[in-house]
Image (spheres, rainbow, N blue to C red):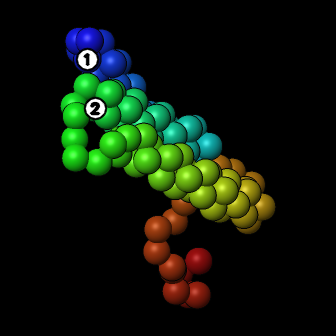
Amino acid sequence: MRPVIPYVTAALLFGLGVYGVLRRRNAVLVLMAVELMLNAVNLILITADTTVRAVLPHGGQVFALFVIVLAAAEIGVGLAIVLQLYRMRTTVAVDTIPLSEQPEGQR
């Protein structure tokens, strides 16, 4: 089997995810772009597991399961943060979020 097609597909998915993280203003779309990047990594892990015979059998599949668990936890925490942000600021635009606390006199 020639693994060129899955590797190129994973690279395109990862590039699309990076573009989404860097260019999107909506926090939910940024989370979706991060999920796209994690799925690209899963594709690379599974493809490498099937093409490269390593010492550990099915090592790539085990790591892919860990990535899926990590993605589920990230979405749970990320959506909770986005919902709290929406309740506090009534917007989920990433570029309007203040990154530092302002003193009381400057508000």
First in residue order: circle 2 vs circle 1: 1
In the picture shown, does residue 106 fall above or below 75?
Answer: below
Question: On the image, numbered disc 1 is attached to which residue?
Answer: 3
Q: Amino acid at mark 1?
A: Pro
Residue at 70% across, 60% down: 80
Q: Left or right: where does residue 82 sit relative to residue 64?
A: right
Q: Left or right: where does residue 55 sit relative to residue 66?
A: left
Asked whether residue 9 is in view, the answer is yes
- How far apart marks 2 and 1 lie (CA) works out to 8 Å
Residue 26 horizontal/vertical position (percent): 58, 42
Residue 103 horizontal/vertical position (percent): 52, 86
In the picture shown, does residue 2 fall above or below 88?
Answer: above
Residue 9 horizontal/vertical position (percent): 35, 18
Q: Left or right: where does residue 82 sit relative to residue 38?
A: right
Residue at 51% across, 40% down: 35
Q: Amino acid at mark 2?
A: Ala
Residue sitting nearer the eye, 68 or 75:
68
Residue 62, label in figure = none
Residue at 23% across, 12% down: 2
